[in-house]
């Protein structure tokens, strides 16, 4: 049995929205039913991090939208409409003029332009890379236009680390340059794929990904990296796919559903990326 088939066979009954969403995408051709994910949607249109949790999450709402795009059903489309209405109302706290004034004049521990904002992880917090990147991908995946997309893409470029890549939110804190993370970097370059912006930053970040993951043993980071490099047809994709296969096989019995699903997607031929819609 091929590794990818073995991975798909291990995907069970997920208990978190991230596991459920990524499993739905991985099993999109196997007759998987999105009903459980749709039923977890809150009345606001948002999804929480886990089933039976009340607190809405931008990151998990965007992931649910990416998963439902693969299911051409009326319930999936209706759920998406509600989710996009909710996402459109949510923005990073720095979008408010009072917080922009605060960041410009008083809160100087971090370095970023508060006029460039995206989406927070949760309500009433500032913008972060992962929820902003996945929200952009969700809008693009569903072919939804929004005036929120360009400021959000500008925000990602403004928060990029000096040597390439992205940290979780800021690039500099207390005058110290923060190190980038492979997963956040992969999400950011995938989100920027459709924009003719920051090409030099994107190229530098792809180079960072390829170099940083060369010795990586984490299937989660490797899978995100393979997807990002593949979207840009980067030379480093093939080597990292082999590496992903090696480490996924070695850790197969210990990996949670979200990691298994990401690995299965990255081991497709060609690797799946969230910058296109497959039918």
Image (cartoon, rainbow, N blue to C red):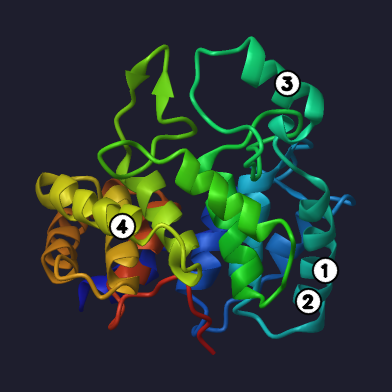
Q: CA distance from mark 3 to mark 2?
A: 39 Å
Vertical arrangement, residue 179 with respect to residue 105, above or below: below
Q: Residues within 10 Å of mark 1 (few under 14, many from 20)?
A: some
Q: CA distance from mark 4 to mark 3?
A: 30 Å
SS for dot 2: helix
SS for dot 3: helix
Please name the residue that numbered disc 1 is placed on: 81
Q: Residue at x 28, y 83 (%)?
A: 269
Q: Quadrant of residue 212?
A: top left
Evaluate if marks 2 and 4 touch, with contact meaning CB atoms under 8 Å apart.
no
Residue 106 position in % (x across, y down): 64, 9
Q: Quadrant of residue 271?
A: bottom left
Q: Residues within 10 Å of mark 4 (few under 14, many from 20)?
A: few
Residue 22 position in % (x across, y down): 50, 62
Please name the residue that numbered disc 2 is placed on: 77
Number of residue marks: 4
Q: CA distance from mark 4 to mark 1?
A: 35 Å
Residue 75 position in % (x across, y down): 81, 76
Q: CA distance from mark 1 to mark 2?
A: 6 Å
Evaluate if marks 1 and 2 touch, with contact meaning CB atoms under 8 Å apart.
yes
Please name the residue that numbered disc 3 is placed on: 101
**Mark closer to the chain start, 4 or 1:** 1
Q: CA distance from mark 2 to mark 4?
A: 36 Å
**Mark closer to the chain start, 4 or 3:** 3
Vertical arrangement, residue 154 with respect to residue 81, above or below: above
In-image side of 140 versus 183 (left or right):
right
Judge whether residue 251 can be spotted in this image.
no
Image quadrant in which the N terminus is located: bottom left
User: What's the mark number on residue 200?
Assistant: 4
Residue extending farthest to the right is: 43
Residue 44 position in % (x across, y down): 88, 50
Q: Nearer the viewer, residue 80 or 189?
A: 189
């Amino acid at each position: 049995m091929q590794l990818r088939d073995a991975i798909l066979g291990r995907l069970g009954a997920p208990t978190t929205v991230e596991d459920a969403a990524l499993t739905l995408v991985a099993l999109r051709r196997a007759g998987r039913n999105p009903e459980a994910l749709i039923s977890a949607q809150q009345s606001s249109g948002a999804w929480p991090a886990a089933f039976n949790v009340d607190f809405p999450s931008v990151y998990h709402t965007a992931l649910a939208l990416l998963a439902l795009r693969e299911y051409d059903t009326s319930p999936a489309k209706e759920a998406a409409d509600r989710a996009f209405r909710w996402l459109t109302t949510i923005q990073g706290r720095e979008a408010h003029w009072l917080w922009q004034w605060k960041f410009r004049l008083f809160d100087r521990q971090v370095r970023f332009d508060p006029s460039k904002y995206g989406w927070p992880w949760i309500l009433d917090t500032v913008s972060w890379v992962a929820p902003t990147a996945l929200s952009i991908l969700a809008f693009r995946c569903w072919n939804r236009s929004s005036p929120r997309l360009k400021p959000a893409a500008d925000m990602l470029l403004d928060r990029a680390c000096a040597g390439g890549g992205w940290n979780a939110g800021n690039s500099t804190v207390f005058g110290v340059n923060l190190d980038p993370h492979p997963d956040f970097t992969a999400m950011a370059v995938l989100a920027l794929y459709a924009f003719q912006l920051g090409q030099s930053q994107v190229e530098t970040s792809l180079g960072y990904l390829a170099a940083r993951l060369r010795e990586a043993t984490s299937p989660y980071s490797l899978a995100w990296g393979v997807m990002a490099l593949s979207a840009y047809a980067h030379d480093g994709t093939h080597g990292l796919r082999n590496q992903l296969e090696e480490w996924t096989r070695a850790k197969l019995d210990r990996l949670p559903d979200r990691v298994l699903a990401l690995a299965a997607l990255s081991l497709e031929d060609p690797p799946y990326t969230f910058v296109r819609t497959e039918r």
